[in-house]
Image: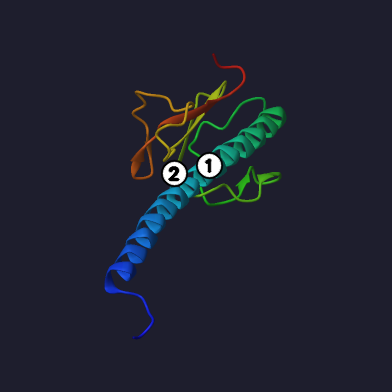
Amino acid sequence: MRRGFTLIELLIVMAILGILSAIGIGNFRTARIKATDAERKANLAAVAKSLEAYNNDHGSYPTTNLSWGTPFTDGTSTYMSLLPDDYYYYTSDGISYTLYTYLGNTQDPQIVDGLTTTCGSATCNYQLKSSNQP
């Protein structure tokens, strides 16, 4: 009599491994989306700080759209060495500004419903307003 595993035992082990793999891949994907969202929020906070520095120097915020993926400079001062290039949008009237981005985690409590602004190929669902804006 030979010792070894039966076909049924091997199939059960393979099924268990498949289930565990599916759970692990799902958790990994969720963690990756949350990490991307955290990075986008941090990028907007950094852009907001550079906009405040620009406002301190010029007395107003830039009214033209920011050139994402390029340095944020006024020709003499560099406020941010490289603006992030992802799903972002900026709007300003010179007195206040709003920064927008798209968050992939639909369960994020900071998501704003009803935004119609386009961030790249997606509709923005998160915004960061200047401190002087209600």
| Residue at 63% over, 39% down | 46
Question: For this rendering, which residue is in front, 38 or 125?
Answer: 38
Which kind of residue does numbered mark 1 sit on?
Answer: Arg
In this rendering, does residue 101 appear at all? yes
> Toward which corner of the image does residue 112 lie, by quadrant?
top left
The N terminus, quarter of image: bottom left
**Secondary structure under badge 2?**
loop
Q: List the residue tagged with mark 2.
A: 87
Q: Residues within 10 Å of mark 1 (few under 14, many from 20)?
A: many
Residue at the farthest bottom position: 1
Which kind of residue does numbered mark 2 sit on?
Answer: Tyr
Question: For this rendering, which residue is in front, 19 or 127?
Answer: 19
Question: For this rendering, which residue is in front, 63 or 41?
Answer: 41
| Residue at 35% over, 60% down | 18
Question: Which x, y percent locates residue 10?
Answer: 33, 70
Question: Which x, y percent locates residue 101?
Answer: 46, 37
Does the residue at mark 1 contact the one at mark 2 (Cβ under 8 Å)? Answer: yes
